Image: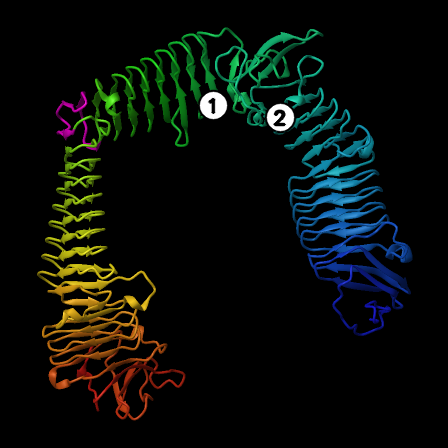
Amino acid sequence: MDAAGNIPELNSYWSQLTTKSYTSSSFSTPLIKGGSYGSTFSIQVGGALAFNKFKATLTGHVSSLVLLENGQTRLSVATNDPVYVQNVSRLPLSLFVQGNDVITGSSLDDTIFGVTGNDRLYGKGGADRLNGGSGNDGLDGGLGNDALFGGDGRDTLTGGAGADTISGGAGIDTISYVGSDARVSINLSTGTGSGGHATGDRLSDIERVVGSRYNDVIVGNGLSNTLQGGGGHDWLSGGSGTDVLEGGIGRDTLSGGSGADIFVLRNIADSGIGETRRDLITDFTPADVLDLRSISSRFALTGDFTGKGGPQLHYYHTTSSNGTRITVVEGDLNADRKADFQIALKGHIALSADNILGDLLVSPSGTPGGDPFTGGSRNDTLVGGYGADTLVGNGGDDHLFGGYGNDALFGDSSEPSSTRYHDWIGTPGHDALFGEWGNDTLYGGAWNDTLSGGYNDDVLYGESGDDVLQGDSGDDALVGGAGKDLQQGGLGDDTINVGAVSEMLGDTVDGGLGIDTLVADYSALGTGLTFTAADDLFTYFAPGGFLVTGIEIYQITGSKFGDSITGYALNDTLNGGGGADYLRGLGGDDSLVGGTGRDLLDGGNGEDHVFGGTDDDTLMGGLGRDTLYGEQGNDSLDGGDGHDTLYGGEGNDGLSGGAGNDTLYNDAGRDTLWGGDGNDTFKIGADEGAADEVHGGADGDEVEFIVSSPSSAYSAYIDLENQAANAGIAHNDRFSEIEKFIGTDWDDVFLGDGIANYFEGGDGGDILNGRGGNDTLDGGRGSDVLTGGAGADLFVLDLSLTNGKWPADIITDFNRAEGDKLVVQGGVPTLEQGLDSNASAAGPVFIFETDTRRLWYDADGSDPEGNPILVATLLNVTSLFTTDFVL
């Protein structure tokens, strides 16, 4: 390579070529010499460059030149390059590319192979060979008689001018004649083309054809084809198979052939108004479909032909000017009550909603009132009009609008579907809505309506008027709305909502069979509420003036005054709202919310959740595993019997766990915590030095310090003999009858008293001193200092935490005579002693160095590959025995 970066000569006789990185946008080697039997030269193009010029002169017996690139480089060959490879050697240029490449060939005969990736290959002039390889490729042969092979993937092939041989390969492939300069005729059955750019073309493995802007003729084959005419007055014939035909702009003639075909109208400009402008489908059958989805999603559907209040697509039968019987389908999209597009179908055909894809109303033409109409099996929209209409959705997820008048709306007369969701709306009039099968949503609208959910899980809204709501079978939700409503849940676990105070007067509620729930909102009541739930077998008048029977669960919201609300045996939700309220859950797993005011909340039996809200509240869990939240104010919490969880919240709170193994959180403020009977756990967090009192009570209780702040200032300092010295997270706190303390992730100090203490340091370098009594000291992670003091003490050594990443614990006063023991978690009883840490026996073993007082653990024993781990240092200990260990 010379100083300018060019290669003066490539010679096939050379045994080795020196490589060099090259960053220019052009590449030049004046001379490429071949051997006596012909040579192949390969040049690797690398880097993220766009090479727009490649110069080379070939001499001798050079059979081919191959350029390889790395998937990032684009190589573009200029047509007017005077020293391009083909111009000199008249040999084919071969490009083998990987990645998502854009390759433009020359005016000569190029061979371009896309290999992998989504490529765009352009042959330009010459008889080119383009192969897309794998991926979704675009191939354009340009001028000349080209050969195009799509390969795997969804490819788009454009032969251009010339007699081309085009094969799509595997996948759904497209042949495009959009750029043709004249009309084309394409026949996929014979694999031939004629006219314009299709002249002389041979086609295979093509599934989709896109025509030109002229009057094209496109014929499919026995497979499923997609034929698009483009502009002009086209004639499309699908043949056998399930075909998709789209005429495009112009007066097109479409023939689906045998099979269930889809005829697409993408824009109202594709099929105009009148016999000379609209498309004609010559063989529409009940199995075929008009796809109008692009129209219905593109336009605001606010008008129709008759003023019924919704968009409309309808059809009528007539005769064309030549005497042919036709069916005209037309739609109004802009609320001017005039057709915006038409499609003609040969013959008098009875259409249903099954023949339409799109969000448009489907109805036969007729008068605006008293319409009986049945939808198809797909998703229909039916609008009744002014009269007493009967609408049947049939299959699918339908929208039914009763319109004005006394209407009857039926959802589905077929079998149920787990994915069916219906919306049925009755506008003014005395309507009857029947959900039948499926998970339905019914809206009664104004006036006195009857709503019947039918099968499955339905939602019924009576809205205004004196309505009758019947859930029937399934787990239904009923909302009466304004008026004197009769709400009947029927079978299943139903929820019946009588609404606000202004809506519930005069209602009648019957839950029926199942576990039913009553929802009532008294927040607008002008005085305090007294609500006492009753057995579901009784019928009684509830506050607000409605009759209740068959209800098992209550969801009651109180007023802004002082209320008294009592639930019943199951899982009630009681919200006091404002004022000083008295809420009692009684049986079941209840949720009680005090709201504002000084409330008294009693969960009763069951696993209750009780929330005090603002002000100074009293919370009682009762029997069961309850969770109590004091929230704001100076609250009093009593868990009662059972394993309860109590959160004081803000303020100076008093927490009593009662009987059972309870968990108590101090939270903010100066709190007093009483564990009561059972093994209780006190979670003590940072509360800015508030003086908390923690009393364990009977049995074995523990204090665990919980810190969310990553700061060593929140470590714990506890001195049980002089608690005035308590500091850190325990500043000003006092503890009594606590058997166990668990430290933070920082460096804690725990100093015991004359009784048996259990100290667990947690993470960090902790100092644990039991003083008098039979203590248990567990340093946890980190290098800890453990001092048992007087008494038979236990020193816990967890081998799973001893991994050599930090120094081992120091035990200052191990005394065999006092009964001290080493508690080993995960260890073995084998013990060796000596002047080093080398084990003599195979297998797991403890090794005590008598001179350094260090205790080692070797999981591999005498295996030279094993490494012993330092467990602890025992000061003033000269020997250990297996009897000193507790495993």
Q: Which residue is mark 1?
A: 377
User: What colouring does the structure picture have?
Assistant: rainbow
Q: What's the residue at 60%, 26% (across, down)? A: 262
On the rendered structure, is 91 left or right of 625? right
Q: Are marks 1 and 2 in contact (CB under 8 Å)?
A: no
Q: What kind of element bears circle 2?
A: strand
Dot 1 or dot 2: first in sequence order is: 2
Looking at the image, can residue 234 be seen? yes
Q: Which residues are magenta?
A: 528-557
Q: Quadrant of the N terminus?
A: bottom right
In the rendered image, residue 530 lying in the magenta stretch gets the answer yes
Q: What's the residue at 29%, 30% (across, down)? A: 475
Q: Position of residue 598 (x, y in %)?
A: 16, 41
Q: Quadrant of the C terminus?
A: bottom left
Q: What kind of element bears circle 1?
A: loop
Q: Which residue is mark 2?
A: 264
